[in-house]
Amino acid sequence: MREPTAAIILVGNELLSGRVEDVNARFLLPELHALGIGVKRVVILPDEVDDIAKTVRECAEQFDYVFTAGGIGPTPDDLTIAGVARAFDRRVVHHEELLLLVAAHFGEPLAPEHLRFAEVPEGAGLIHSEHAPWPILHYENVYIFPGVPHILRRKFEAIRDRFQAKPFITKTIYTRQDEIDLAPMLYRVMADFPTVTIGSYPQWSQEDYRVKLVLESKDREALHRAYAALRSALDPSLIVDRD
């Protein structure tokens, strides 16, 4: 079975300038990984409609899920809705249900700034949840989230079960061998077990080991076989058991 994939698109000049530190991708990455979704791209974009449209279009074609964060609201730099609409050659329209919610929240008459909260790409859908007072907006496989971290988290947690897939399984080996000496073994094991990935993470602050090796796969049998093969290739006197 093919692994579901995703891309995360962060929108905001403030991220590119360093004025604001991203926390949304830092939240979404482990959440999606725990759900069994392989995130293949994280992109930070400026507040420019053409850039947003181009990237959303490319990611929506390549990956199963696309999550955008930021660029939603009443100010001139809130351009994500327009970018997603352009990506799919759609107009920006007011969603009738959102108009009612906006009117109930702000009261009438509604100013143009209020109406911005009801804008969607034409044909977009709303996902309702009792855990999120405001619907989650999506167009096909693109899920559009605000950039405010606590709101994004609340909205994602309300729909996270939609993205549940076969989970990743990991096994870890710690060794005092140098990474350069490990490289040939890692190449051999990965060639023998193509469904298993191996990450090699050298450490200089740890006194008891030099390299942490993380094997990961959705194929449990292949993972255990690769783990056994790698352990047998390592110098047993240099393996550190930390569990």
Image: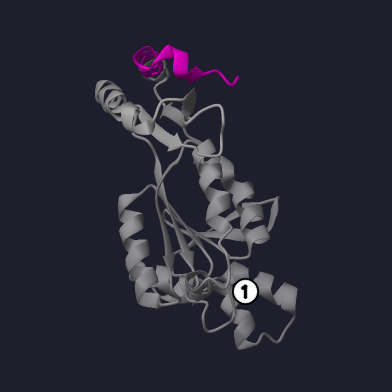
Seen in the picture, residue 173 relative to 126 is either above or below; the reply is above
Question: Residue 143 at what x, y percent from top left?
Answer: 49, 57
x 56%, y 26%: residue: 208
Inspect this view and state whether residue 134 appears: no
Q: Relative to residue 34, is residue 39 drawn left or right?
A: left
Seen in the picture, residue 118 relative to 126 is either above or below; the reply is below
User: Front-most of 103 and 25?
Assistant: 25
User: Front-most of 207 and 45?
Assistant: 207
Q: Relative to residue 148, is residue 5 drawn left or right?
A: left
Q: Is residue 165 magenta?
A: no
Q: Relative to residue 137, is residue 38 drawn left or right?
A: left
x 45%, y 31%: residue: 211
Q: Which part of the image, by quadrant, shows the C terminus?
A: top right
Seen in the picture, residue 106 relative to 221 is either above or below; the reply is below
Looking at the rendering, the stretch of residues picked out in magenta corresponds to 225-243
Question: Residue 93 at what x, y percent from top left?
Answer: 48, 76
Question: Residue 40 at what x, y percent from top left?
Answer: 38, 47
x 46%, y 18%: residue: 238
Instruction: Give the colour scheme shown.
Output: one colour
Q: Which residue does the numbered mark 1 point to in the structure image? A: 99
Inspect this view and state whether residue 135 appears: yes
Q: Quadrant of residue 227?
A: top left
Examine the residues drawn in magenta and state their main secondary structure.
helix
Seen in the picture, residue 30 relative to 8 is either above or below; the reply is above
Mark 1 burial class by Cα count in 10 Å: few <14, some 14-19, many 20+: some
Q: Is residue 234 magenta?
A: yes
Q: Which part of the image, by quadrant, shows the N terminus?
A: top left
Q: Secondary structure at mark 1?
A: helix
Q: Quadrant of residue 109?
A: bottom right
Question: Residue 51 at what x, y percent from top left?
Answer: 36, 72
Callout 1 amino acid? Leu
